[in-house]
Image (tube, helix red, strand yellow):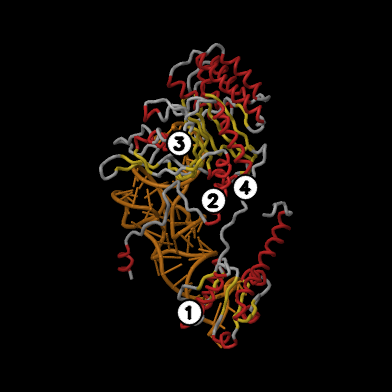
RNA sequence: GCAGCUGUAGCUCAGUUGGUUAGAGCACCAGAUUGUGGAUCUGGGGGUCGGUGGUUCGAGUCCACCCAGCUGUACCA
């Protein structure tokens, strides 16, 4: 026996690469329903669906050509047989830019499109952050108007409400990167590297709080594990000025109040004024059509995608608080974002094409909706299982399955090789509502046994002895073979009525019926 | 990338100052039970103790290096 053990060798581990996961039926079903809702809202705004491939040429997606040292920096890449680099898409915006550039002549401008699908990032995963996740985007390409920016924000707000998220439980926070540029000009900080550090520090406001941001703008910050992050090195006066800008959105008031505060901070900077002007135009439009600051607010701490956005930037946040695993109450956080990217198409054509869009993080949003119990879709009900008692009669069992299917009842014949006990166990594990049993005795009498597995499970608790369990045959009825479909239907109806009554008493009947 | 923590069965873990053939619970399979899911009892399968090297008569246990995972942080186009 020792010999056998040695022969086995190393087994492969049944494992997933980090940051990837399997998705069970219930989540798939719910995600489909969610996407259908969002798609409906976008379609009603006139955004047509487009699907692009998962794989693009690396240079078409961006400037991230894999190099020898670190071939997979951020994006999953590999070489085709002709040695050209291919990459898995890391968002849905870069492929859209490629599509628009490739079809520029044919497309109506502005071109309005929506896309939904998986994207991939070769980054370190964290809680709720995966290396494959789903996004749903809507973009307007070919319009420089702030009205287009306002529109995608309004559309995102509509989509959240269509999904059942209450007004007040979400907010779209809007900023304009030109304003920050203006503020930095004002404090005499034009150094590009320092500017990036400053932007990143600001981006951490909601996660780490104002104290941490202050530290990161100045000398630097020591984190929990004792690791030190170098700061932007601003002096005290500069830090004060930048913080005043960052916190201009926190002091409350409406969009006009925030704009007024920002205007003072920007001073004479032309670029800053341009940003203010764009935000003002958005505000006027939003006011005129009735999207208040409870839905779309101005917040200078929103930064986002640094090299890619050229003007307005948006971030959607769920504002209700949830308990994490340790019981702490935390904000649910960001479920989407976007902004204006006027230079992306120009990478291909050399011709400036203004564009703006919004991207919903479908996976994050799914987690939120699950928490809010807004997912009405559930996985397909498990099938009725027809037991195979007599291998010579499989055609008879198959006929029962066909009859049930014809009546639109999901049904399957047991496909294993085990005996009756194992078949019952299978039906139970499977979550089957009913087992259909027809042995020799039943056949001679022209009947079948229907076993209500859900009711039977309830009764099992009260039965202690094996003998009683076997002999009482809980929740099992004999019905004429000819009435199979009708009686199965009855039993299923009773089960779903019970389930509804049960869930109503459990939740207080708060859910609207379909 | 940087820092801290952790690696023993499919899962969760125990394993004393280094000492026979490395254990438990859960899960899985079978039997008790001629044709009934649960409960109970009995039996069974499943381990390169993360890897390599070292110290030792002897290493799951001690040392060194490496690898992986988790958490924080950085990066996130």
SS under mark 4 = helix
Q: Residues within 10 Å of mark 3 (few under 14, many from 20)?
A: many
Q: Is residue A116 left or right of residue B51?
A: right
Q: Residue at x 57, y 25 (%)?
A: A300
Quickly name the residue at label 2: A32
Q: Which residue is mark 4?
A: A371
Which residue: 52% across, 74% down?
Answer: A423
Pick the front one: A47 or A405: A47
Q: Earlier in the sequence, mark 3 or mark 4?
A: 3
Instruction: Write down the residue under mark 3.
Output: A93
In primary-sequence order, the first of circles 3 and 2 is: 2
Say which of A66 and A109 sits in front.
A109
| Disc marking residue A395 | 1
Marks 2/1 same chain = yes
Marks 3,4: beta carbons within 8 A: no
> Mark 3 falls within which chain?
A
Q: Mark 1 or mark 4, which is nearer to you?
A: 1
CA gap, disc 4 and disc 2: 17 Å
Task: Tell me the mark number nearer the camera, choosing from 4 and 2.
Answer: 2
- Place of residue B32 in the rendered image (x, y in percent of width and height, measured from the top left): 54, 82
Q: To which chain does the residue with label 4 belong?
A: A
User: Are both tags, 3 and 4, on one chain?
Assistant: yes
Residue A38 visible:
yes
């Amino acid at each position: 026996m020792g010999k056998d053990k040695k022969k086995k060798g190393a087994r492969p581990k049944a494992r997933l690469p980090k940051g990837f996961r399997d998705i069970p039926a219930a989540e798939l079903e719910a995600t489909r329903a969610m996407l259908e809702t969002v798609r409906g809202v976008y379609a009603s705004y006139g955004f047509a669906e487009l699907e692009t491939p998962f794989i693009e040429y690396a240079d078409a997606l961006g400037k991230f050509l894999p190099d020898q040292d670190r071939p997979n920096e951020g994006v999953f890449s590999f070489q085709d047989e002709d040695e050209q680099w291919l990459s898995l898409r890391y968002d849905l915006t870069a492929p859209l830019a490629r599509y628009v550039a490739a079809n520029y002549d044919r497309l109506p401008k502005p071109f309005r499109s929506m896309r939904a699908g998986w994207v991939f990032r070769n980054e370190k995963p964290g809680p709720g952050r995966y290396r494959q996740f789903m996004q749903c985007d809507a973009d307007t390409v070919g319009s420089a108007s702030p009205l287009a920016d306002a529109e995608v924000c309004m559309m995102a707000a509509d989509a959240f409400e269509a999904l059942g998220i209450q007004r007040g439980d979400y907010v779209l926070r809007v900023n304009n990167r030109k304003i920050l540029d203006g503020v930095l000009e004002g404090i005499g900080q034009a150094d590009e590297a320092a500017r990036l550090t400053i932007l990143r520090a600001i981006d951490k406001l909601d996660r780490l709080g104002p104290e941490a941001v202050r530290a990161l703008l100045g000398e630097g910050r020591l984190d929990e594990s004792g690791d030190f992050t170098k700061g932007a090195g601003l002096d005290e006066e500069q830090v004060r000025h930048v913080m005043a800008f960052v916190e201009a959105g926190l002091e409350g008031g409406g969009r006009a109040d925030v704009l007024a505060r920002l205007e003072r901070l920007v001073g004479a900077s032309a670029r800053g004024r341009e940003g203010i002007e764009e935000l003002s135009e958005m505000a006027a439009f939003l006011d005129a059509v009735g999207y208040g600051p409870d839905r779309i607010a101005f917040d200078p701490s929103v930064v986002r995608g640094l090299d890619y956005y050229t003007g307005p930037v948006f971030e959607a946040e769920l504002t209700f608080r949830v308990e994490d695993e340790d019981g702490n109450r935390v904000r649910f956080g960001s479920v989407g974002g976007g902004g204006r990217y006027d230079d992306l198409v120009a990478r291909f054509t050399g011709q400036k094409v203004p564009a703006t869009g919004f991207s919903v993080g479908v996976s994050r949003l799914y987690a939120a909706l699950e928490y809010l119990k807004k997912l009405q879709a559930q996985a397909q009900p498990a099938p009725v299982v027809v037991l195979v008692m007599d291998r010579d009669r499989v055609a008879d069992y198959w006929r029962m399955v066909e009859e049930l299917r014809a009546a639109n009842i999901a049904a399957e014949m047991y496909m294993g090789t085990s005996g009756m006990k194992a078949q019952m166990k299978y039906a139970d594990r499977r979550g089957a509502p009913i087992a259909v049993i027809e042995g020799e005795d039943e056949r001679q009498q022209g009947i079948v046994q229907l076993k209500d597995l859900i009711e039977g499970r309830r009764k099992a608790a009260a039965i202690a002895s094996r003998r009683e369990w076997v002999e009482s045959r809980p929740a099992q009825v004999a019905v004429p073979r000819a009435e199979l479909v009708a009686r199965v239907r009855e039993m299923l109806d009773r089960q779903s009525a019970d389930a509804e009554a049960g869930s109503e008493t459990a939740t207080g009947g708060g859910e609207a019926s379909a």
